[in-house]
Image (cartoon, grey):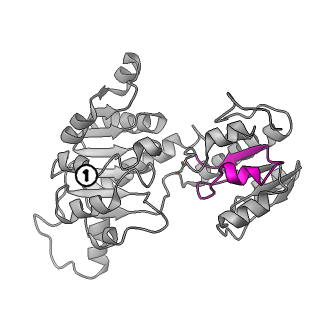
Amino acid sequence: MKVLVARAVFPEVLERLRRHVEVEANQDDRVYSAEELRERLSDKDGAITTGSERIDGALLDACPRLRVVANMAVGYNNFDVPAASARGVLLTNTPEVLTETTADFGFALMMATARRIAESEHYLRAGRWQKWSYDMFIGSDVHGATLGILGMGRIGGAIARRGAHGFGMRVIYHNRSRLPAAQEAALRATWVDKATLLREADHLVLVLPYSAGSHHAIGAAELALMKPTATLTNIARGGIVDDAALAAALRERRIAAAGLDVFEGEPAVHPDLLTVPNVVLTPHIASATVATRRAMADLAADNLLAALTGGTPPTPINAEGLQPRG
Ligand code: GLV
């Protein structure tokens, strides 16, 4: 059986895969074009991918042997799930193993944004620091403030817990489905409608999956509802925020600051975001700790090997509704 590991991964994980299947690796970590990916997958039974590899019906039609694609990410908007299900291709992702690490990062980015850590560090490095001043880089408090969470899944819950229990924050959230009362009580989080969330949050954190329905969930109209003192942190996906509208709001100080780990069209970053000072920019690293990236790679390998050897993949996306592959 042949598999493609579409991007570089820990060598130990490749070695483990090689004990069971024939592996084509990409340790140079080149991002394949759609054509090259299709060509390399055309004789493969399985693949490990990241969010950079798009798996859709056209690709699957050109890869008749493919049985499983294991994403090394919890988000899977790079997958056309109905197209894979209709063709009998199992898709998997890596939930749970990255929840706490990603929540740590979301909290760190929100704090860096509120307390102007990146902006002040650039100032210091540039040799501009002459004296202490009462109003130099004054930001806004995190403790005791209102934390707004848009999207209340596993990572949203982990951020809510940090805010409510660690920092004494009032936590409000908006999600299509409201959490059961016991879970809300445990998190000390209150469901509100989206407009209330935008109006009342001092620090708004986005943790919802990307889909056609969440495209530009935060655009000019939503930004206009936020407090001029508020911060916005996006650790979810590029495209959820209208980056051009956000850059304009930041420039005009219609909101105080933003922290962004994900971007529309990344790795390209909207040029206006690069020129406004009140934004902290990081290159999609929210899950990037040694332990978590290793756990993600191991889970992707577990899913792949189980699917190819008649086992039960631990974290399938489309096990239900999967048509037999003809
Ligand atoms: C990273 O963005 C992920 O979805 O795991």
Q: Secondary structure at mark 1?
A: strand
Q: Is residue 214 visible?
A: yes
Residue 217 placement (x, y as % from top left): 35, 45
Any magenta on residue 300?
Answer: no
- Marker count (numbered): 1
Q: Give the residue at the far left of this rendering.
A: 134
Q: As displayed, is residue 117 above or below residue 230?
A: below
Q: Quadrant of residue 27?
A: bottom right
Residue 148 placement (x, y as % from top left): 29, 39
Residue beneath the point at 37% across and 27% down? 187
Residue beneath the point at 25% across and 51% down? 231
**Highlighted range, magenta:** 49-73
Residue wearing tag 1? 231
Say which of 221 and 186 sits in front: 221
Q: Quadrant of residue 306?
A: top right
Residue 256 placement (x, y as % from top left): 20, 57
Q: Is residue 211 left or right of residue 168?
A: right
Residue 147 placement (x, y as % from top left): 28, 39
Residue beneath the point at 49% across and 66% down? 267
Q: Which quarter of the image is occupied by the C terminus?
A: top right
